[in-house]
Every structure is written in C-alpha cells, then in structure tokens.
Image: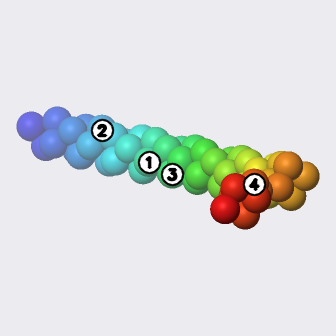
Amino acid sequence: MRHIAWILLVFHLNGCAVVAVADAAVTVASTAVSVTATAVETTVDVAAAGVDAVVGDDEDEDE
C-alpha cells in the first residue's frame, strides 16, 4: 500500500511539471502574438499617416 501512495505521488508531481511547462509555452506564445500585433498595429498607423500626408484633407476646402 505504501508503494502505491509513492507511485501516485510521483505521477502527481509529474503532472504538475507537465502543466507548468504547458503554461510556460502558452505564455510565450501569447507574448509573441501580442508583440506581433503591436508591430502590425504600429506599421498600419505609420502607413495611414503616410497616406494622410500624401492625400491630404479636403474638409477645409468645402467650407
């Protein structure tokens, strides 16, 4: 009976290690997605500013 308790304890601790590694992998992946999204957002903002600078704004001419 004592051996079964030790075996269950070892399997439980291994399960915790697997969960910890999986959690770390998800954290790294979500951080990478967040950084990529921020980079894309910045690129879009810069491109939009460039288009606005080239095209200009016609609101003042209508008034």
Secondary structure of the residue carrying numbered label 3: helix
Reading the image, the residue beneath label 1 is 23
Tag 4: amino acid: Asp
Name the residue tied to disc 4.
58
Residue 47 position within the rendered picture, expressed as x and y whole percent measured from the top left? 81, 50
| Mark 4 or mark 2, earlier in chain | 2
Task: Return the residue nearer the eye: 48 or 63.
Answer: 63
Foreground tag (2 vs 3): 3
Return the residue at label 2: 11
Give the Cα distance between marks 3 and 4: 46 Å
Please, is residue 30 above or below residue 63 in the view?
A: above
Q: Quadrant of the C terminus?
A: bottom right
The three-letter amino acid code for the residue at tag 1 is Asp
Residue placed furthest toward the front: 63
Residue topped by disc 3? 27
Amino acid on which disc 3 is placed:
Thr
Which label lies toward us, 4 or 2? 4
Residue at the farthest right position = 54
